[in-house]
Amino acid sequence: MPNRLKIVTACGLGTGTALFLKTVVESIVRKAGIDASVETADATLAAAMKPDIIVTGPDLAERFQKEGAAKIIIAVYNYGNRREIEEKLLEAIQRLKG
């Protein structure tokens, strides 16, 4: 795994949900002391960026899985549930460090 993780938060247009998730993900990695760059993207661009992790909704997660768009795809079911996002993200990072 490279020293700096590349994380992309994605939604259909790369604005609303992706921007909200970016804020939450940045906060989680900062608090955990993890070196990561977090960017937003729309559904098309996210796959082309080849990040380590994509954080998105379940609808796009399935598509990204099929495309092999990232090493790990995290599907968030409740954007308002920070605990869900944090648990899934930290577990994914541990798997990458493997």
Image (tube, rainbow, N blue to C red):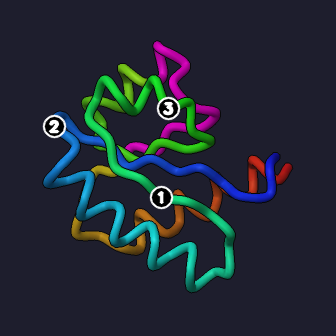
Residue hosting label 2: 13
Asked if residue 57 is positioned above or below residue 43 in the image, the reply reads below
In x, y percent, where is residue 9? Answer: 37, 49
In x, y percent, where is residue 93? Answer: 68, 56
Q: Mark 1 Cα within 10 Å, few/some/many (few <14, many 20+)?
A: some
In the figure, residue 85 lies in which quadrant? Answer: bottom left
Question: Under tag 1, what secondary structure?
Answer: strand
Question: Under tag 2, what secondary structure?
Answer: loop
Residue hosting label 1: 38
**The one of 14 and 59 positioned closer to us in this rendering:** 14
Question: Magenta span covers which residues?
Answer: 65-75
In the figure, residue 91 lies in which quadrant? Answer: bottom right
Asked if residue 77 is positioned above or below residue 58 in the image, the reply reads below
Mark 3 or mark 2, which is nearer the start of the sequence? 2
Q: Is residue 70 magenta?
A: yes
Q: Do the numbered discs 2 and 1 sit on residues whose CB atoms are within 8 Å?
A: no
93 sits to left or right of 66: right
Q: How many marks?
A: 3
Q: Mark 3 Cα within 10 Å, few/some/many (few <14, many 20+)?
A: some
Residue hosting label 3: 49
Mark 1 or mark 3, which is nearer the start of the sequence? 1
Find the distance from the CA under tag 2 to the CA under tag 1. Answer: 17 Å
Question: Under tag 3, what secondary structure?
Answer: loop
Q: Amino acid at mark 3?
A: Met
Q: Amino acid at mark 2?
A: Leu
